[in-house]
Image: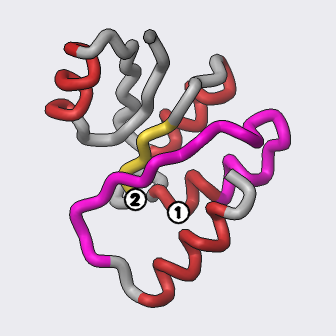
Amino acid sequence: MAQPVWEDSGDVLARNLRKTNWTVDLAENGRAALDRLAQARPDVILLDLGMSVMDGFSFLEHKRENDDWDGIPVIVVTATTLSAEERRRLNGASRRC
């Protein structure tokens, strides 16, 4: 199964996915991920909440604003503990992603 995946700093994750025949497209930041999303619709998005230039929360807000991107599943990947406010933002964004 070959599917595009976007994620900020997931070199190890990308390498492991490629071993299982996934097609992986890494974006260096949230803005670059949005630009790529405008060019091609992936099957799934792996999203780092702590990206530079545009964080994952802002990426989700922009994604939610575009009806063409509805239905693309997003899997959040983060190494940080989320605050109550961040969990609230994430839960609100996930309702339409």
How packed mark 2 is, by other alpha carbons closer than 10 Å (few <14, some 14-19, many 20 or more), is many
Question: Mark 1 is on which residue type?
Answer: Phe
Using the image as rendered, state which of residue 29 and residue 63 is in the foreground.
63
Q: Is residue 33 above or below residue 95?
A: above
Number of the label disc, if any, that sits on residue 57? 1
Residues under numbered marks 2 and 1 in contact, where contact means CB atoms less than 8 Å apart: yes
| Residue 57 in magenta stretch | no
CA distance separating discs 2 and 1: 6 Å
Side of 33 where 27 appears, left or right: left
Q: Residues within 10 Å of mark 1 (few under 14, many from 20)?
A: many
- Mark drawn on residue 94: none
What label does residue 49 carry, if any?
A: 2
Q: Please give the name of the residue rendered at 44% of the width and 28% of the height, measured from the top-left corner.
A: 5
Q: Is residue 45 above or below residue 43?
A: below
Q: Quadrant of residue 60?
A: bottom right
Across the whole image, how many numbered discs are drawn on residues? 2
Q: Is residue 49 above or below residue 37?
A: below
| Percent position of residue 64, x then y | 73, 53
Q: Which residues are magenta?
A: 61-81
Decide which of tag 2 and tag 1 comes sooner along the chain: 2
Which residue appears at 53% of the width and 33% of the height?
A: 44
